[in-house]
Image: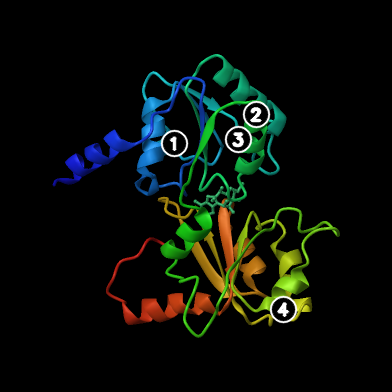
Amino acid sequence: MTVASAVAHIMETLPRLQAGQVWLAGAGPGDPAHLTLLTLSGLDQADVVVHDALVDPAVLALAHPAAARIPAGKRGGKPSAIQADITAQLISLARDGKRVLRLKGGDPFMFGRGGEEALTLAAHGIPFRIIPGLTSGLASMASALIPLTLRGVNQAVVLATGHGADRTDGMDWAALARLGQPIVLYMAITNLAVIASALIAGGLPGETAAAAIASATLADQRIVVATLATLADAIRREAIAAPAIIVIGAVVETRARLLALLPALEFPPS
Ligand SMILES: C[S@@+](CC[C@H](N)C(=O)[O-])C[C@H]1O[C@@H](n2cnc3c(N)ncnc32)[C@H](O)[C@@H]1O
């Protein structure tokens, strides 16, 4: 079977996006190569694509030419649509009989408000389906050659948000520090210095390896490796900007080991 016929065969078996239905779909980390066939099928079928700010233009370009594209992103620190307005718009479009693709970066159920939107759609009797996507926390690890689990090094992984970490009623960072397991942080660039201090105060050594991966999978991807104590400064020095994933833990050291063992291989720019 050729790739084209295999893809065509799978596409034929996929569910149809019905009139009046909303698909809450993940667009993956950026590079369209990471789209699932279900999300691609949603892009092909939708009358309207309501998309987040982080959905890459190369992904949006795959929508059906007749589809309306409505930006509805929420970006930290920048003017953005109010969540209640976004959900009201989804309900209204579905009630108008549109086939609606609600497209989010990464996975819709990972720090993407997909849960809140699904609950509201369900409460209003709007039929919906969740289409998973490759979350940026995992895609970033692949791009940076950092295995999130390594035998003999860790038995668990923590996925956390850095958003709101500067609030006193936020996360118990000392509890995460005590786990001694790798920590993957979304939305953490702004509060990284605060988070690092809290983790160090909680007992995680400042020398613990740490890395930032910005714009993972995209042409402007950047990777900075430092330690828990020095990463915030390194990010500032290197002018690393959001969107970025932070990873803290001994697993980060694997990147240097792999690069040393495979110097002849070409990897994405770092
Ligand atoms: C609102 S959260 C959405 C997460 C998304 N639902 C996911 O599963 O990846 C936005 C954060 O995801 C991370 N992110 C999204 N795309 C990224 C990328 N291509 N590279 C690195 N981090 C990314 C950043 O931490 C960003 O601040």
Gap in Å between the C-alphas at discs 4 and 1?
Answer: 41 Å
Q: Is residue 187 visible to the viewer in this orientation of the structure? A: yes
Where disc 4 sits, the SS reads helix
| Mark with earlier residue (1, 3) | 1
In this view, the residue in front, 168 or 112, is 112
Where disc 1 sits, the SS reads helix
Where disc 2 sits, the SS reads helix
The tag on residue 57 is 1
**Badge 3 density bin: few <14, some 14–19, many ≥20, Cα 10 Å:** many
Tell me if the residue at label 3 has its CB under 8 Å from ligand 1: no
x and y, in percent, of residue 147 in the image: 46, 71
Q: Quadrant of the C terminus?
A: bottom left
**Are discs 4 and 3 less than 8 Å apart at CB?**
no
Eye-nearest disc, 4 or 3 = 4
Residue visible at 40% across and 31% down in the picture: 43
Say if 210 sits above or below 36 in the image.
below
- The residue tagged 4 is 178
Where disc 3 sits, the SS reads loop
User: Image check: 250 left or right of 124?
Assistant: left
The tag on residue 87 is 2
Eye-nearest disc, 4 or 1 = 4
The tag on residue 73 is 3
- Amino acid residing under circle 2: Thr
x and y, in percent, of residue 139 in the image: 45, 58
| Mark with earlier residue (2, 4) | 2
Gap in Å between the C-alphas at discs 4 and 3?
Answer: 35 Å
